[in-house]
Image: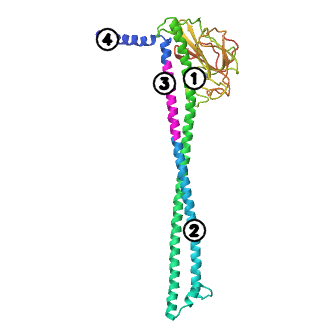
Amino acid sequence: MIKKAMKFILVFVVSFAFTCNVFAVSNNTSLKDLKDKLAKDEATLNSVVRKQNQVKNTIKKIENELGDIAKEIDRYEREIKESKDKVEELETEIKGKKTEIDNLLNFLEVAQGDNVYLEYIFKAKSFTDFIYRTAVVEQLTKYNDETIDEMYTLIDENKKEQARLDKKIDDSEESITKLNKTISKYNLTMDDLVEDHKDAKADYEASKKEVQAYEKIYKENKCSETTPIIDCVDIPYADGLIRPTKTGVITSEYGMRLHPTLGYYRMHNGVDIGVPMNTPVYASAAGIVSKIVRVKNPNKRNSSCGGNMVYVKHRIKGKEYTTVYMHLHSINVKLQDFVTTGSIIGKSGGGESYDYCTTGPHLHFGVMKGSNYVNPRNYVNFPKKGVRWSSRM
Ligand SMILES: [Zn+2]
């Protein structure tokens, strides 16, 4: 019994120690972590580009199909036109034949003057000849009747063919409508991918610059790649984080939420601070500017999600923290700049015409502990949602 209990405790202790070990690993990021992140960003970018190419090819294929169908419709229309001409021709012929028959019948019933048939019959030399000639005229009438019947059959066939071609045109037009719908769907996907591409590209480029900057410092300071940044880089010591703006109001909390512009639930990894456009944004603590995402044209709605962003790395009680400032209208700092709580890192943006992830002027403020986003409220003294503040602390 004791043995069994000991075994249980041992298993418990070992597994506890193992679990602790996992979580005891420092959250602080190293150059190697940044390089891994860069590799991920590159893979994401490549996968978006691949998807874009796939969708582009699909759209092109459908467009070719549409071109072929349009050509087919042209052909059907030409065939219908030819068939209609043929019917018209037959109808004219029938009219002629009918007149001819009428003339013959008129002769047979009431003999009239200046008629070729009449003349023909009256030129009979004998009664037998007269009978013979009458029979010839009757046969002519019969022949004409048969020809007319044949022509009516031809007209029928032509009309049937026209109906068949009309049906084909209808079917083709239906296919065109369907294909156009598919194309618009793919175009929407393409729009999303274009945005994804901008995001992925901005992320990748910022990560690349970040890695390059740290690579240089790591080399200068002769650090191993796996050494945490705060142990290799001279990041100023800070006591804690304070509000990044002099006045403001929390308009959206950290956590899962229905995204205001994307329309689906996703993690909101910071708080939104309602401030007018161009409000000075300060570093939340002393630190070093570790990453800058700069979009080419922040005044266009098509810039990447988050727009201009600044990341500042801090050393707080031996732990690495990063504060993140998004939707900036302008950026005042450079990569690896040292900042204090008095440094303006940029001016706020986020207005209507800003990046596609915002609906109104605000600052998105995020806090990362190591490489994980955490709730900024646990580190910064923000008043309740909707309550305005008028000092940094
Ligand atoms: Zn936000």
Tags 2 and 4 in contact by the CB under 8 Å rule?
no
Instruction: Return the disc, 2 or 3, that comes first in the chain's sequence.
Output: 3
Q: Looking at the image, which residue is at 54% across and 64% down?
A: 159
Foreground mark, 2 or 3?
2
Examine the rendering and report whether any part of residue 186 can be seen: yes
Q: Is residue 39 magenta?
A: yes
Bounds of the magenta segment: 37-60
Question: What's the amino acid at mark 4?
Answer: Lys
Instruction: Return the disc, 3 or 1, that comes first in the chain's sequence.
Output: 3
Q: Does the beta carbon at disc 2 come under 8 Å from ligand 1?
A: no
Point out residue 303 in the picture as x, y percentages from the top left corner. Answer: 62, 26
Q: Which mark is residue 202?
A: 1
**Residue 31 in the figure: left or right of residue 337:** left
Q: Looking at the image, which residue is at 58% across and 33% down?
A: 191
Question: What's the amino acid at mark 1?
Answer: Ala
**Other-residue count near label 4 (Cα within 10 Å), few / some / many at <14 / 14–19 / ≥20:** few
Residue located beneath label 2 in the image: 89
**Residue 384 in the figure: left or right of residue 181:** right
Residue located beneath label 4 in the image: 7
Foreground mark, 2 or 1?
2
Helix or strand or loop: what does disc 2 sit on?
A: helix
Q: Can you say which quadrant of the picture contains the N terminus?
A: top left
Point out residue 348 in the picture as x, y percentages from the top left corner. Answer: 67, 19
Instruction: Label the magenta part by its dominant secondary structure.
Output: helix
Residue located beneath label 3 in the image: 43
**Other-residue count near label 3 (Cα within 10 Å), few / some / many at <14 / 14–19 / ≥20:** some
